[in-house]
Amino acid sequence: MTRPHNYYAGPAAMPVEVLEIARNEMMDFGGTGLSVMEISHRTKEYDAVHQGTIDLIKELMGLGDNYKVLLLQGGASHQFAMVPMNLIAPGESADYVVTGTWGKKAYKEANIIAKGRVAATTEVDGVFKTMPAQADLDLDPKAAYCHITSNNTIYGTQWKTFPNAGNVPLVGDMSSDILSRKFDPSPFGVIYAGAQKNLGPSGLGVVIIRDDMLAKCNKGLPTILSYGTHADNNSLFNTPPTFAIYMVNLVLKWIKGKGGVAAIEQQNNEKGKLIYNAIDSADGFYTNTIAPDDRSLMNVVFNLQTEELEKKFVTEGQAAGFVGIKGHRSIGGIRISMYNATDLASVQDFVDFMQDFAKKNG
Amino acid sequence: MTRPHNYYAGPAAMPVEVLEIARNEMMDFGGTGLSVMEISHRTKEYDAVHQGTIDLIKELMGLGDNYKVLLLQGGASHQFAMVPMNLIAPGESADYVVTGTWGKKAYKEANIIAKGRVAATTEVDGVFKTMPAQADLDLDPKAAYCHITSNNTIYGTQWKTFPNAGNVPLVGDMSSDILSRKFDPSPFGVIYAGAQKNLGPSGLGVVIIRDDMLAKCNKGLPTILSYGTHADNNSLFNTPPTFAIYMVNLVLKWIKGKGGVAAIEQQNNEKGKLIYNAIDSADGFYTNTIAPDDRSLMNVVFNLQTEELEKKFVTEGQAAGFVGIKGHRSIGGIRISMYNATDLASVQDFVDFMQDFAKKNG
């Protein structure tokens, strides 16, 4: 069958070329005669995948030698717990800038484990439609860290310029836009991301931690929940999710082959222009009320005039081969998730569909 | 290339038929036109995989409705922490029967988190060569649970009859022999297993928990580390490792197709007879000093007379197509891991190799 346009929010589209390699190597990985998921994590064949993945993340993100890359099990929800567990020392608290559902969950978790403090929230009547300005942030200069969510999958907002927390290290949940654009990592003490949007299949969390943060992690934690355990053992303390890491490795090579993050970013900018232009030029048939500077290039949310029309849009869209276009169950509407693996031609096809639908139903 | 005989201890051999299905469905899962790892965990297509996996585990293991099956990220090392975190109430302690490296790690973890007590250990001079008799157990009738490791991958020992802890619920780490044999689950309050031996790829932990244990789990835990979170959400609180679960689903269907656990157990018994007989009948060329009743049917360890000869055995064995036969780095010697996916013919080929090697070097 023809591949549909995959707009799921995560697990999400993977590059076809990557899936084809995984298929072709399923019965014989690297001349072993075995699948990569059947070989020990202590073999030289797997080690090349493991180390290669760590090295490529560092290379593609331009991380200095003062950052360690950890490949852990569990996604972002797991890091909501590990971050405060490791990084808020007794008597300290951490700042949270809450710009969506996931940031709110991260904040709540910090208060189960230690002490979190809201440095800003854009929640109004239970929803998040805006992003805070730098002046809106009430920052604690003694905070253990300042946590942000770089992109909000549900509300379709994104930090275009990261906030300045002064001497307080940023901790960034970048699950939904890691490797989608270039940025200066130096203000970040920790960056984490679940793999299932821009990196690969679900089941893996990438944690990037700066050496000074690693040095001040709390001691006496459960072994498996301590960043130190994994840093000391190069993420081989326990059996890593080898197949997921192999898939991420293939995705990273694909990004590099495309020209790296700069080239990917350019494509993401073009995709964004295309679709937001289609929304804004539809004479109100489609609406997105997010300030242009805050609009996400990964998850585009919009509404039609009525719920009924939205339902029709989803049904006809699916029939036309666009899957995963229904908005998150908590806010409804339409949502298009267009991560790195979504190409410009797919977005163009979707825009054509939007214009056609507007013409017929306007 | 010809598939080698895969004797890795984990990640380990998977049924060829399962890998072939995964390969054939890589670009189009269930008529979606997408890989199973690209679709949302909230779709009906994935839900059939998820629920099917839970149902098949219950069916194949003969679990009553008083057990919940959780599909979690992280393997056994993760459960070393989650078990005491959830199940030892303030003021309580838990018993640990320590019969190998992994049981010892589980015990240590209990003491980081709460309080563990050794009910028995068979460690002598840093190694574990025996299993305790029921009379050797110093059980605390007030223990929160009694933890055992059903099979010891490094030392090649296995509980053939599980110990009786009276009214204290057993907690079993069955990572390396789950679904390899029939047993009565009723004394177990919790059974857990990393997937990468008998179930599928690494990156998934299966936790089976009885309702009475679930009811008394500690409150106020980090959300993601609470069994209650996952039980209440049918393991869909956060994005599950969908591809790993899909692979486990295929393995479970394969077991069912073979005739279920009873048929698998019979094959495992035959494999065990074959190889232990080859060791015992080699006139001392090969030695395994474990009491016959305690010998593992999953991991067979043995020695040759000298380390030099063992090295030669490994080198020639690998050249003959037997991979993963070197003993664990902590004890040396030879180790053959023959989980469910290893068939009798493979073990027969290995026994032929052993006999040939003994003839040439004896």
Image (cartoon, coloured by chain):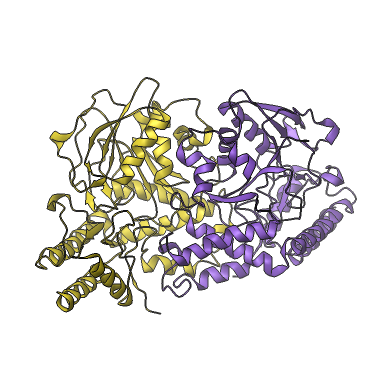
Chain colours: A purple, B yellow
Quadrant of residue B288 within the rendered picture: bottom left
Q: Can the viewer see residue B34?
A: no
Question: What quarter of the picture does the N terminus of chain B occupy?
Answer: bottom left
Q: Which image quarter holds the C terminus of chain B?
A: bottom left
- Residue B132 percent location from the top left of the image: 17, 40
Q: For the point 42% across and 60% down, which residue is it?
A: A42
Above or below B38: residue A167? above
Query: Which quadrant holds residue B111?
Result: top left
Front one among A116 and B218: A116
Q: Position of residue B276 (x, y in %)?
A: 16, 62
Task: Say which of B166 and A288 sits in front.
Answer: B166
Question: In this image, A215 relative to A293: left or right?
Answer: left
Q: Residue at x 85, y 49 (%)?
A: A285
Rendered location of residue A124, percent (x, y): 77, 29
Vertical relation: A70 (above or below) A79: below
How many numbered tags mark residues here? 0
Question: Residue A258, image x and y in percent?
Answer: 71, 68
Toward the top, the furthest residue is B91
Drawn side of residue A338 relative to residue A209, left or right:
right
Q: Looking at the picture, does residue A100 appear above or below residue B166?
A: below
- Taking the image as drawn, is residue B140 in sight? yes
For this rendering, which residue is in front, A352 or B331? Answer: B331
Q: Is residue B201 left or right of residue A288?
A: left
Pick the residue in front: A103 or B257. A103
